[in-house]
Image (cartoon, grey):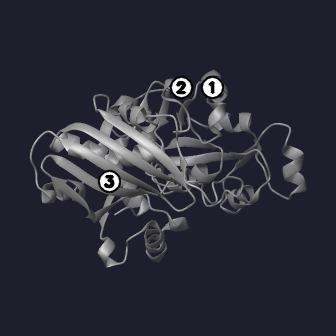
Amino acid sequence: MVVKVAINGYGTIGKRVADAVTLQDDMKIVGVSKTKPTFEAQVANSKGFPLYVLAGNEKKFDQAGIKIKGTIDDMLKEAEIVVDCTPGDLGDQCKATYGKANLKAIFQGGEDHELTGTSFNALANYKEAWGKQFVRVVSCNTTGLIRTLFPIDRDIGIERVNAVLIRRAVDPRDSKKGPVNAIKPVLELPSHQGPDVQTVMHSLKISTMAVAVPTTLMHVHSVIVDLKKDVKKEDVLKIWEGTPRVMLIDGSKGLPSTAEIMEYARDLGHARGDFNEIIVWRDGMNVVGRTLYYYQAIHQESDVIPENIDCIRSMMKTEPDNMKSIQKTDKTMGIK
């Protein structure tokens, strides 16, 4: 079975999901959408993706010399499932459209959990999305927290988590936002990421705070975990070494900050310089008594991409085993 996938919104996440889908032998792109004739629409053309546009905007694309296949409504007729990558305030409207077309749809972490009632992480709750019509892949920060916390809770047990999220101000492509010369705390406490983790890890006790800083490269999390039993630092490292989509690095070996990590991604030849893995500093973690301390770095543009691929398989019921899906996705995407 080859699943027919449409990408509604060919932007930061949408274009990465489209590329990832094309690497799979059990799914294919039937169309991507743009509302304006931007450079990304031209890129979609150059890659041979059927391009669909908002009804009424056809003339703008024609004037820009960008070939289109039809309108978004036309695209939906070709699809079995839609990966929705539209702006976060359009979820209710888009869900109604997909429902009317009798389509399945994956929404992104910018939407609230209540939109779908099911939030997704491939390692932690793959089966919860099984056969569902609407599912939400959690945000980049939530994905990062779940990737490292879930295996610790599974293998050791967690009493409580406290985390501070140091957030990049904007994506590298965004020239319209700040802060430029400030550290901006999220004043609503605790921040929303803790409850978001609980939409997947339902019984986890977690509290989070967040600040935005003037960088565009990555987020960094400072995490403190109270464990249920005594373990050694090496025990935790061994768990993470065996966890998909988690990469251990050493600051002492030339990777002390997000700047070097992003350069490392480029040196490794990663597409767009992305890091789909969650980066944990081996020499930036420690266990004291029953308390685990660690730092991790999150590439906000790309860590959720493999989760979208696995979510397609769960919703379309094409692979019942989450580890087989993860392994297939990671192999095709070059995730070590």
Would you say 312 lies left or right of 62 here?
left
Instruction: Name the residue carrying label 3.
Output: 327
Q: CA distance from mark 2 to mark 3?
A: 29 Å
Residue 192 vertical placement versus 65 (above, below) = above
Crowd class of label 3 (few under 14; some 14 to 19; many from 20; radius 10 Å): some
Amino acid tagged 1:
Asp
Crowd class of label 2 (few under 14; some 14 to 19; many from 20; radius 10 Å): some
Residue 101 location (% of width, % of height)? 64, 25
Residue 207 vertical placement versus 279 (above, below) = above
Amino acid tagged 3:
Gln
Q: Which quadrant of the figure has residue 162?
A: top left
The residue depicted at 68 percent of the width and 52 percent of the height is: 177
| Among numbered discs 3 and 1, the one appearing first in the sequence | 1
Instruction: Name the residue carrying label 1.
Output: 92
The residue depicted at 42 percent of the width and 68 percent of the height is: 257
| Among numbered discs 1 and 2, the one appearing first in the sequence | 1
Q: CA distance from mark 1 to mark 2?
A: 7 Å
Would you say 64 lies left or right of 15 here?
right
Q: CA distance from mark 3 to mark 1?
A: 33 Å
Residue 272 location (% of width, % of height)? 55, 66
Instruction: Name the residue carrying label 2.
Output: 115
- Residue with the most extreme left position: 230
> At numbered mark 1, what does the secondary structure look like: helix, strand or loop?
helix
